[in-house]
Image (tube, rainbow, N blue to C red):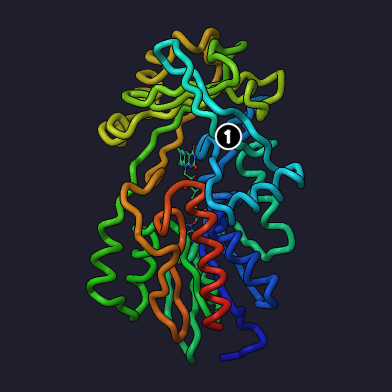
Amino acid sequence: MDTESTWDVIVIGAGLSGLLAAARLQSGGARVLVLDKGRGMGGRLATRRTGPAVFDHGAQFFTARDPEFCSRVDDWVAAGIVKAWATGFALADGTFKQDGETRFRGVTGMSSIARHLAQGLDVRVQSRAAALATRGGAWVVTTEAGECLPGRALLLTPPVPQSLELIATASFLPPERVLGELKQIEYAPCLAVLAQLSGPSLIPQPGGLWWEGEPISWMADNQQKGVSPASGAAVTVHAGRHFSRTHWEKPESEVTGALLAVAAPWLGSVPVHTQLHRWRYSLPLRVHPERCLVLCETPPLVLAGDAFGGPRVEGAALSGLAAGAALARLL
Ligand SMILES: Cc1cc2nc3c(=O)[nH]c(=O)nc-3n(C[C@H](O)[C@H](O)[C@H](O)COP(=O)(O)OP(=O)(O)OC[C@H]3O[C@@H](n4cnc5c(N)ncnc54)[C@H](O)[C@@H]3O)c2cc1C
């Protein structure tokens, strides 16, 4: 193996967990390469612009409870990347649910957190890892485009079913018990409608509406949130888990029509353009107890992401930090 062209760590996934792990490793002196199959970075921290309208269509906000994560969030707030959004939202029955816990958002959208973290890192987007192998004591990642990228260690941060698909391409087989635990990690799907409106919505201040049910679980007004400009009225509608499952294969027009019909009392203006995003893996329904999982020590192979240690944005962040620390020890 040509060590000159070998990275110390190849990170698959430029979501929050992968980027935090990569930054931790690079700051410790490691040569790190991050690959992501998406057009942009951030994974489920996703922001999309359509004409004048800007939508957060994946994670809507996050909370911070663990002291390590709270101190990261303080840094992001100080850097102007993140700000407090709200401590409660309206409910669909017209009441307001206030619990005093701060929900944070990306100042220009949730994906701005990823772009901030990626500064100074070697991140290659539109680069899908297609196969894994070991050669000469290192991992080799073959991309869909046919590139063979060698790394002394490998970190996988995609949702667990996608990481397992990648692991299945390598001759390496994790212990039966571990594999069994990983196969039990399932995710809720989420159908997300992005609706550009002709004018302002009727979603109450500060721009979020908790439905907490079916067929809609959440609506957000991206203009009130401060993500979409005054010229771009933009509402995100997240379908509930059951609706998303039962309508997963249905045509876009049918799904969008059904959800916007239910959302109509809160739209207040006419949808002038709509898009549907299908999140196959939105939130893990079960979480592995460890913050990251060392599947192999030589050469190191570690799994991380929001299915390890704790779910959601905070869980993903803590998992990425734990994976970075674990890999630094193993290198
Ligand atoms: C609709 C929705 C609503 C949500 N709402 C909230 C919320 O309000 N609050 C909250 O805290 N959390 C929320 N979440 C969850 C939150 O977004 C995630 O927990 C967190 O962003 C996960 O980060 P991650 O790094 O673990 O994974 P991801 O962000 O999924 O990153 C994994 C990355 O791996 C990449 N990848 C996968 N396979 C490959 C491959 N073969 N090659 C290269 N790259 C690959 C993907 O493109 C992706 O970028 C929501 C998620 C969704 C989808």
Q: Position of residue 142 (x, y in %)?
A: 49, 72
Would residue 274 be seen by someone viewing this image from the given angle?
A: no
* Residue at left offset 44%, top offset 18%: 91
Displayed quadrant of residue 53? top right
Q: Position of residue 255 (x, y in %)?
A: 36, 25
Q: Amino acid at mark 1?
A: Thr
* Residue at left offset 46%, top offset 63%: 304
Q: Position of residue 13 (x, y in %)?
A: 52, 59
Instruction: Work out whether 222 lies above or below 296.
Output: above
Q: Nearer the viewer, residue 206 or 234?
A: 206
Q: Position of residue 187 (x, y in %)?
A: 33, 47
* Residue at left offset 41%, top offset 43%: 282
Image side of residue 313 versus residue 3, left or right: left
Would residue 322 be seen by someone viewing this image from the given angle?
A: yes
Within 10 Å of disc 1 (Cα), the crowding (few <14, some 14-19, many 20+) is some
Displayed quadrant of residue 233? top right
Quadrant in which the N terminus is drawn: bottom right
- Report helix, strand or loop for mark 1: strand
* Residue at left offset 71%, top offset 18%: 231
Name the residue that disc number 1 marks.
102
